[in-house]
Image: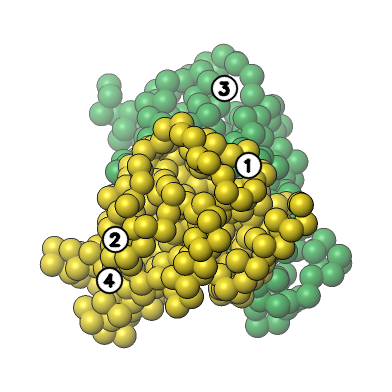
Chain colours: A yellow, B green
Amino acid sequence: MVALLQFRRCFMPSAQLYAVVFDAYGTLFDVHSAASTIERLFPGRGSQLSQLWRGKQLEYTFLRTIGERYVDFWSITESSLQYACDALMLPLDPGARHRLMQAYNELAPFAETMEVLLALRESQRHLAILSNGSPAMLRALVANAHMENLFTRVLSVDAVRQYKPAPAVYELASRCLDLPPQRIVFVSANGWDAAGAGWYGFRPYWVNRQAMPIERLDSPPRKTATTLKGLPEYLDQLEASQN
Amino acid sequence: MVALLQFRRCFMPSAQLYAVVFDAYGTLFDVHSAASTIERLFPGRGSQLSQLWRGKQLEYTFLRTIGERYVDFWSITESSLQYACDALMLPLDPGARHRLMQAYNELAPFAETMEVLLALRESQRHLAILSNGSPAMLRALVANAHMENLFTRVLSVDAVRQYKPAPAVYELASRCLDLPPQRIVFVSANGWDAAGAGWYGFRPYWVNRQAMPIERLDSPPRKTATTLKGLPEYLDQLEASQN
C-alpha cells in the first residue's frame, strides 16, 4: 500500500546500509508522456506545449518557495498549463484543461522503471519517493502504475510547504526514513535536484536522460547514468565497498 | 555619486508621496545588448547563447536561494555562462570568458531609459535601484551609463544574501528608503519580479517589453506598459489621485 504521505518520525528497520529515495517526475515517470494527449487536443503542438508547461511548472515551484507563497503542486500544474497555453495562444477550455490535468495523474513510467524497482525490492532494499507532487497526485500516479507495494514511503513536499531544493524537503526523507543523509542514495533525472540533494548531504545519483551538461552548482553527483538500469549494481558495489 | 550599496537604516526626506524603485537587468539595462560581443566570439550564436545564459543565470539565483547556498551574482553569471557554453558546445577559453563577463558590466540602457530617469529626477522624485547584481557589478553598470547622479540608492541583494523574489530583498528597499511598501512603485520588466514585489506589498509597474503572457502567480501588476516611457505620467496621476 502507499504509505503515509504526511511527515512523521518513524522507525524503519534497515535491511541494507543504504536506502534509495527517488524523485518522481522525470525520474520514475515521464512528464512528457502526456504529449500524446496534448497532441490530440492541439495537433502539432504536443512537444512544444509539454516543454513549456514543464519549464513554467518548475519555475513556479521556485518562485513560490522563495516568495513564501506556497500552493500545492496541483495548483501550480494548472497555473503553468494556463501560462503555457497563453504563451502559445492555444485556447484552454474547461474540457481540455480537465483532460490535460488528468493526463498528469496518469504519466507513464519510463521503460526500465518497473524492472529496476522490482530488482531493488527483491534485495530487501527500502525505497521511497520524495516528490514535489501533492499527496493526491502521487497516490494517483503510483496506483496508476501498479507500484503500491514497492515503496516504504511516498513523501510529498506538501508536508513542509516548500519545494525542492529546500533543505527542509530533503530533511523530510532523512527524518522519516530515520537515516542520516549520507545513507540515502537520492536518484533524480533533474540535475538541479541532484545538486540540491548533494547540498543537503545525500549521495546523488543523476539519471541524465537528456544528455544535459552538468549543472554548475558546486555539487556534482556521486554517479551519473543515462537510465535507471545500473542502479541495483551501483548499490551492490556501494554496500560491498563499505563491508 | 552612487549611494551606499549596503543596507543601512536611513532617513530620506520625501518630496513626493511615492518613490520609484527599479529592477536593473532587463528593465533599465538590456541584458541582450551583450549579444553583439557574443556574436563576434561565436558567429551565428549570439542570440541563442544570450538567451540560454540569461535563463540559466536566473535559475541559479532561484536554486541557490532555495538551497541556502548563496554566492554573488558575478559568480552566478560566470557559472551560467559556462553552462550555456557547455550546452551549445562552444569552447570558452579564459579570454572569451573575460570579454563576455566584461560585456555584462557594460550593458546598454534601453533607448528610453535615460530620458525617463531625467524626467523623474526633474520632478524631485526619489529613484533607487534594487537588483540581483553584486555591488561591484552595479557600480560598473551605473558608471558606464553615466547615471551616477540619478539614484538616491543603488541597492544590491548581496546585503541580505538572497535573490529575488525573497521578501527580505524587497524589505531592503522599503527599509533603506524609509517608506512603507505601499509607497513604493516597483518597476520591473521581469513579470515574476513584478509579481514578487506585489506579494511583498509594493505597487508593481510591469514593463512587458517582450509581450509575454501575464504570470499566473496571483499577483497582477498595478500597471502594465511596453516601455518605461509612460512612467512619469503614471506617477503624476497616482499622486494626483491621492491629493
Label 1 close to label 2 by CB (< 8 Å) = no
Q: Nearer the viewer, residue B152 or A180?
A: A180
Per the model, the C-alpha gap separating discs 1 and 3 is 40 Å
Query: Residue B35 at what x, y percent from top left?
Result: 65, 69
Dot 3 amino acid type: Cys
Task: Identify whether B175 is placed above or below A212.
Answer: above
- Residue drawn at x 66%, y 76% is B88
Q: Which chain is indicated by disc 2?
A: A
Q: Residue A201: which quarter of the image? A: top right
The circle drawn on residue A143 is 2
Q: Is residue A15 left or right of residue A98?
A: right
Mark 3 lies on residue: B176
- At label 4, counting other C-alpha atoms closer than 10 Å, the crowd grade (few under 14, some 14-19, many 20 or more) is few
Residue B62 against residue A111 in the figure, above or below: above
Whether pointer 2 and pointer 3 mark residues with C-beta atoms closer than 8 Å, the reply is no
Task: Pinpoint residue B29: horizontal percent, then vertical percent.
Answer: 59, 53
Disc on the earlier residue, 4 or 2: 4
Amino acid type of the residue that numbered disc 4 sits on in the rendered structure: Met
User: Separation of disc 2 and disc 3 at Cα?
Assistant: 53 Å
**Letter of the chain that mark 4 sits on in the rendering:** A
The mark lying in front, picked from 4 and 1, is 1
Outermost residue toward the bottom in this view: A44
Q: Nearer the viewer, mark 1 or mark 3?
A: 1
Q: On the same chain: label 2 and label 3?
A: no
Query: Which residue, given by chain and number where applicable, does mark 1 sit on?
Result: A181
